[in-house]
Image: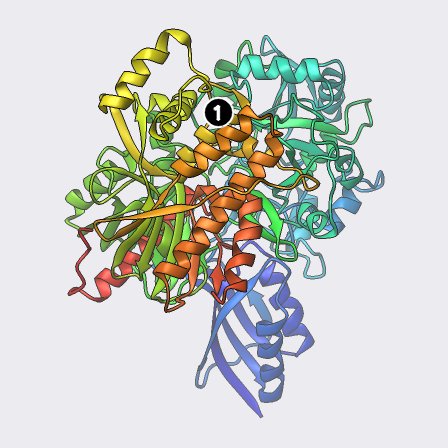
Amino acid sequence: MKQRVRVYVRGVVQGVGFRPFLLRQTARFALTGWARNTSKGVELLLEGDRAALSSFLKVLRESPPPLAVVEQVSVQDAGEGPGETAFTILESQAGAGFTLVAPDTAPCGHCLEELSDPQNRRYRYPFLNCTDCGPRYTILRALPYDRVQTAMLPFPMCKDCAREYFDESDRRCRFETNCCPACGPQVTFYSADRRAAATGDDAFRAAQTALARGEILAVKGVGGIHLACKAEDEAAVLRLRARKRRPAKPLAVLCRDITAARRFCRISQAEAALLESPRRPVVLLEKKVPEAFPALSGNTRLGLFLPYSPLHMLLLDGVFGGPDAVVLTSANRPGEPVLLDNADAFDALSGIADGFLLHNREIYNRCDDSVVFARNGGAPYFVRRSRGWVPQPLDLSQNAEGIFAFGAEEKASFALGKGTRAFLSPHIGDLKNAATLSHYRTAMETFERLFAARPRAAACDLHPDYLSTREAESRAKQARLPLYRIQHHWAHMAACMADNGLEGPAFGILWDGTGLGADGTVWGCEFFKGDFTHYTRVGSMRPVRLPGGEAAIREIGRIALSLLRDAGLPDTRAPVKDALRKPLCAMVEKNLSCVEASSAGRLFDGVYALLSGTPCAAYDGEAPVLLESMLRAEVAGRRYPVAFYEENGVRRFDPRPMIRKLSEDLADGVPAAAIAKGFHDAMCEMALSQCEALNPEKAPVVLSGGVFFNQYLLTKLPRMLKAAGFSVFCHHRVSTGDEGICLGQLAIAAKKEECSTCALPSR
């Protein structure tokens, strides 16, 4: 019996080979009708045997193309009609609504075969891709996903590409960004004086030759422009650091393949799977020799990744004698977003780059590389969630429609709510200047446009001076939206709850460097009870005085001095300049020009300064990373006392007894590795004690905050808590750092909108 139906498909169903898939499957099941892209997804009219229709819909739901995600299939009876004689693809239909967008992915196996086949017309073409792979988000301006809405608009298809586009048997059938060397973008190598020196394969010859002789290149990729140099050429790496003014922060290394990567680091099977996955993140790995490659990274880890575009593969293939591993770091002015435009690259990188490998395809949407650890059997633990995942949404357990969450300032990000989905921004950076704020605004406008997001409420951090807070205030005032100001660590707690689908109540262990507390002081070693409607601060740490305020975050020797003085010890071990020692002691003793911070991150800073004698941190988070790098598996940790006291209903960890004993060990010549491990173990014991004292109900424990990038803590503390009978939840879909805060803000504001009687706490 014949039937005529109308089908609506929602999910990631545009730009992923969905219409060619429909052509093949309708032919297989002898169905007639049509399909078209719409602003909401894909719409079909189908006619055929009832059983055949049922089989088709089963395949549609269960076996879509590799990059497609079918989230919803709605079927309606279409009644009588004139009857369809064939199945055709109609022109796209614009309108209200939205559909999901696929993230950028690395080349598929078929494309890699073409790239290396001398008989193929796309041999060594740096922009080949197909319905199963390649850039999506970075080249898309608007939906529906048609060529005119992408960066491929200036490149009309040649006859051969057009033939493929209409050939139902070709895997590039209806592939909107189809191109080849005859009609697509081109790559050009420019000398330092901006002269075009070579194009096509000769451009890669020039680039590989330049890298081999130690030069620094600007390389335009998929989501931005990078600086590259030979990774194992220490002089070139140090020259890059000096020119970019990045003296110590670790540099990521792009390796030709897993074999090249294994020269640098130990790589487990799970880590190799992450490196070789289509998402191609930067994976933080243990060096084979902890002290190796100091120019690349001053700690025991190194960030490695594999090529995620044909252009990167050709750059590293060694055909012209080039290296098989290069530093690849974002090309930008200090503190500003990665560059996108060729002209900007020439101007901004003058005196930095010795050559430029650029192309003429625009990058519409910035998207930095994602950075992850592998844990729990190979699942990514995000340091930064960006290329390869953005703009893939997160599913929520609540309706967040119209909630705009503006995030924090460090590692800024935003989240937009659409129904029970959260769309999180790509990596933005620290929101401290006009250029980064412009990037932040542009990315938000892109998300609003792509996903038809209309705000009904806004959420931001409690700190009034964050640019994200000011942006939220401005948007809320202009649009007359309710604005929810959410305490920083509550947002951390809510982010981990939402990340794990928890409703609460929960117990939060929330450790980071800085977050404005409800009492106006700096918090950062917090223990909360609560859910999405309220929280209570039940535990914290004795505040550390930071002489000079923010200056102490950079000059960590000041924190060491403050810890010693607070513990009743002489300040002689504190690594500060002699001329500053007496004034700093006076500031601490009299609490003048000091900021008090109950911050785990600052405690890590101060302890590292004591152990290493290092007076300053070169970048945010350097001291805790280097403190963790001191740990050695073969070295047993010292045992340090863990003490507490009550103050205004808050159980506070008192680090003074620990600092006294730690200082004794330093004086006695105990190895730094043993002291560092003892400190880490003491922090775990402190957290366990707080849980046992403050969470007798054994509510689920959530761990959040930048301190939990520390893999030793992240491994040992959950194990200790679970052994004591607690259920423990860590982040797995968003970063534990401030980048993930926007998700918590969104979840809290959504609950607030749902329950207008819930009052934000003052405590």
Q: Residue at x 43, y 45 (%)?
A: 642
- Identity of the amino acid at label 1? Ala
**In front of the other: 176 or 523:** 523
State whether residue 350 is above or below residue 208: above
- Residue 71 appears in the rendering: yes
Q: Position of residue 143 (x, y in %)?
A: 43, 51
Residue bearing mark 1: 609
What kind of element bears circle 1? helix
Q: Position of residue 329 (x, y in %)?
A: 58, 27
**In front of the other: 149 or 475:** 475
**In front of the other: 431 or 707:** 707
Q: Position of residue 562 (x, y in %)?
A: 36, 25
- Residue 385 appears in the rendering: no
Drawn side of residue 96 relative to residue 622, left or right: left
How busy is the neighbourhood of tag 1: few (under 14 within 10 Å), some, or many (20 plus)?
many
Q: Residue at x 45, y 42 (%)?
A: 706
Q: Residue at x 71, y 40 (%)?
A: 634
